[in-house]
Every structure is written in structure tokens, then in C-alpha cells.
Image: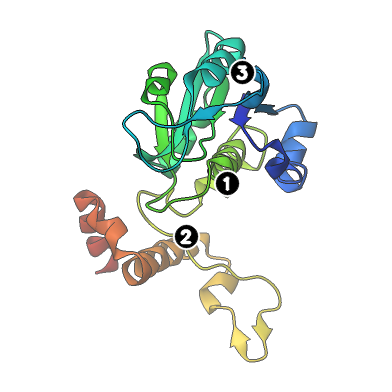
């Protein structure tokens, strides 16, 4: 997979993609991540990329020309162009899976008071990572790249992300433990030491249900079928 990020602040990505799983994915040529400053595409003598909004108002708005030219330069037949914006669809794990199957992603990071509305005409998908406002799309793009890269085949063990929170319908992940079995009187549940994997799987599923009901009951309410299944499993 190739991921191209269009930003006004390339240095914000220094170090983010040079550590841990993403670095290994890059080194193993499973993902190719490129950072582009779309100011470099500006035809303005001063390389300006923003201007005042028609009709008045506070702040500056990103202009069409640099972003249009950057996307046109990078886009291929198999590209999907993503705009990071508070008005986009809320980012979920299922969307991360869908995007991990793409061949080429172009991610546009916004800044200032927003985009010229016409930029939306060259975009395939608008995404928001949550109901809050950031100073720009750079941090949000790191969220996308991290969540997508780990799902690319060969990046991590498939079992690791199959058992993630939000991956089993709307359930949070079950609690996990490691050695020692007794730490300062805090003991690992006996069932996990039993070696009975069928019972362990059932225990983990029950714990996922309990954890979700306690911490994120809203996740169950979003899917009536899942809520009914969880209720039956608990009884």
C-alpha cells in the first residue's frame, strides 16, 4: 500500500512513522508513506495557500489551486482521496479495515479556518476522528495511518487484530494477564491457568460483554441484535 499525506507542516510527522510497527512495515516494504507539503504546489509568488473568505468572517481559508494540483499530480487510477474534516463520517474500525484493502490513499490535512468548498469535488471520502476540533489534520492523519497500517497483511499477526476491541461486533476487548500468576496478592483468574481453551474462550467472551456493559453500554445500544445476543450469553 502507498499512503501520501498532503500537509502544510511536514515536520509534525518527524519520528511518528520511524518507530515500532509502522517502521517495520515500511522497512519490510508493506507500506510506503510519503509526506508532501502542498505549499510546494502553490503558483503564488509567495507560495501562499490561503486567503480571506468571500462574504467576510474570521480566519483564512485554504485555496483550491495548490491542493487540486497536488492531488492531480499524485492521483492514479487506484487512488482514494480522503479529506480530514469535522463534518466527515466518524472513523470506525470497520472503515479502517476497508481502507487497509486499498492500494493508494491520499490524505489531505486541513488547517486554518477550513477549505474552499470546491476542494470537496476531488475527494472520495471525508473522515472525522471524533466530535472535537484539532488545530489541523496532521494528528488525525497519524491516527488513520496507524490504524490502517497494522491491518495490512503481514504487518502484525492476524490474530492480534482479530481479537481487538471493536472488532467482535461492538464489544470491548477482554481482560488479559501475564506472568507472574500472583503479584503482591493480585492473582490471575484460575480459569486462565486451567488449560481448558473452550472454557477460556467462553470466559473471555463473557468478560467482554461485562466490560462493554459497564464502560461503553452505548456500543451495545447501537446494534440491537448484538445486545440481544449478549443478554442471552450472560444468562
Q: CA distance from mark 3 to mark 2?
A: 51 Å
For the C terminus, the quadrant is: bottom left
Tell me which numbered mark, 3 or 2, is placed earlier along the sequence.
3
Q: Which mark is residue 173?
A: 2
Tell me which numbered mark, 2 or 1, is placed earlier along the sequence.
1
* Left/right of residue 195 with respect to residue 232 in the rendered view: right
Q: Residue furthest bottom?
A: 185
Q: Which mark is residue 44?
A: 3
Quadrant in the picture for residue 105 = top right
In what element is the residue under mark 1? helix
Q: Quick check: can you spot residue 1? A: no
Q: Quick check: can you spot residue 15? A: yes
Q: Which residue is at 59% across, 48% downward?
A: 160
Above or below, 116 against 158 in this view is: above
Q: CA distance from mark 3 to mark 1?
A: 27 Å
Image location (x, y in percent) of residue 126: 40, 31
Q: Which residue is at 44% across, 36% downward?
A: 114
Amino acid at each position: 500500500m502507498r499512503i501520501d499525506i498532503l500537509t502544510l507542516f511536514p515536520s509534525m510527522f518527524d519520528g511518528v512513522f520511524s518507530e515500532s510497527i509502522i517502521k517495520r512495515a515500511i522497512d519490510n516494504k508493506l507500506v510506503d508513506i510519503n509526506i508532501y507539503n502542498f505549499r510546494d504546489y502553490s503558483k503564488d509568488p509567495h507560495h501562499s495557500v490561503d486567503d480571506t473568505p468571500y462574504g467576510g468572517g474570521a480566519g483564512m481559508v485554504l485555496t483550491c489551486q495548490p491542493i487540486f494540483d497536488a492531488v492531480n499530480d499524485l492521483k492514479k487510477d487506484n487512488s482514494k482521496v480522503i479529506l480530514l474534516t469535522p463534518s466527515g463520517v466518524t472513523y470506525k474500525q470497520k472503515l479502517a479495515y476497508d481502507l487497509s484493502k486499498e492500494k493508494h490513499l491520499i490524505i489531505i490535512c486541513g488547517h486554518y479556518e477550513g477549505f474552499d468548498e470546491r476542494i470537496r469535488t476531488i475527494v472520495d471520502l471525508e473522515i472525522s476522528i471524533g466530535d472535537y476540533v484539532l488545530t489541523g489534520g496532521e494528528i488525525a492523519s497519524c491516527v488513520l495511518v496507524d490504524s490502517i497500517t497494522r491491518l495490512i497483511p503481514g504487518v502484525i499477526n492476524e490474530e492480534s487484530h482479530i481479537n481487538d476491541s471493536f472488532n467482535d461486533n461492538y464489544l470491548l476487548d477482554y481482560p488479559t494477564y501475564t506472568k507472574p500468576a500472583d503479584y503482591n496478592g493480585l492473582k490471575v483468574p484460575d480459569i486462565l491457568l486451567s488449560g481448558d481453551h473452550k472454557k477460556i474462550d467462553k470466559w473471555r467472551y463473557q468478560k467482554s460483554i461485562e466490560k462493554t456493559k459497564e464502560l461503553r453500554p452505548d456500543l451495545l445500544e447501537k446494534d440491537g441484535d448484538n445486545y440481544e445476543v449478549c443478554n442471552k450469553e450472560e444468562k
